């Protein structure tokens, strides 16, 4: 824990990696470099494409992660993060949630909802995003997004939580986070 790096967290590719959910919300890109023939080659991949499965990435055997690129959020951007585990500061997440978007009055645009520990990779919930995009944050739109997120995630049963419990957490905490945002 003392020498961890964000690049190491990305390359570890854990479905429950805490930094991965906010990075997905922020549309992060992973920069990779190699020097196969004496000259440096660089490529970038969106984080969502870089991670392919638990502990699996698109990093080649001779590549290093040299940077993470994050576009500047648009004016009015708001974001929230939530992690649930038995000991949230030190434990592997049972779920994690990241929400972001551009706030214009009571409306969110450029909506991003990302979830960790609920699928083989950290994931964006595109149906839940679509349910919120351009909508006034009210009880109906918030419930629609929370229900869509619950239906989109694909959790497993393990020692941290059952799949059913994770889906319920996704619904209830997405609901709570969006209700909280609607009141600010």
Image (tube, rainbow, N blue to C red):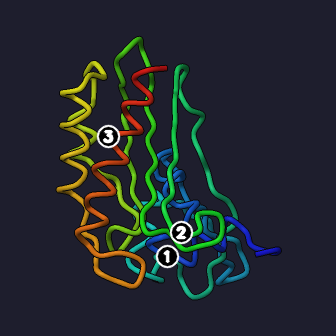
Q: Residue at x 36, y 35 (%)?
A: 111
- Where disc 1 sits, the SS reads loop
Above-or-below relation of 159 to 19 = below
Q: Quick one: quadrant of the N terminus?
A: bottom right
Left or right relative to 36: residue 101: left
Above-or-below relation of 161 to 74 = below
Distance Cα–Cα, label 1 vs label 2: 5 Å
Mark 3 vs mark 2: in front:
3
- Neighbor class of circle 1 (other Cα within 10 Å; few <14, some 14-19, many 20+) is many
Point out residue 24 in the picture as x, y percentages from the top left corner: 47, 53
- Tag 1–tag 2 contact (CB < 8 Å): yes
Distance Cα–Cα, label 3 vs label 2: 22 Å
Q: Quadrant of residue 99?
A: top left
In this rendering, the count of numbered labels is 3
Mark 3 vs mark 1: in front:
3
Could you say which is closer to the camera, residue 140 or residue 74? 140
Above-or-below relation of 63 to 97 = below
Furthest residue to the top? 105
């Amino acid at each position: 824990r003392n020498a961890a790096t964000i690049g190491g967290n990305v390359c570890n590719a854990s479905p429950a990696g805490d930094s991965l959910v906010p990075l997905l919300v922020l549309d992060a890109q992973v920069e990779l470099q190699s020097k196969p023939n004496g000259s440096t080659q660089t490529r970038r991949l969106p984080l969502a494409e870089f991670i392919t499965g638990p502990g699996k990435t698109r990093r080649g055997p001779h590549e290093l992660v040299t940077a993470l690129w994050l576009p500047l959020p648009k004016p009015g951007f708001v974001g929230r993060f939530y992690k649930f585990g038995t000991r949230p500061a030190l434990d592997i997440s049972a779920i994690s949630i990241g929400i972001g978007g551009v706030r214009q009055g009571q409306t969110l645009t450029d909506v991003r909802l990302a979830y960790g520990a609920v699928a083989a990779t950290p994931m964006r919930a595109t149906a839940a995003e679509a349910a919120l995009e351009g909508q006034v944050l009210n009880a109906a739109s918030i419930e629609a997004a929370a229900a869509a997120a619950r239906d989109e995630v694909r959790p497993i049963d393990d020692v941290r939580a059952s799949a059913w419990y994770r889906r319920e957490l996704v619904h209830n905490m997405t609901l709570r986070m969006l209700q909280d945002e609607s009141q600010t």
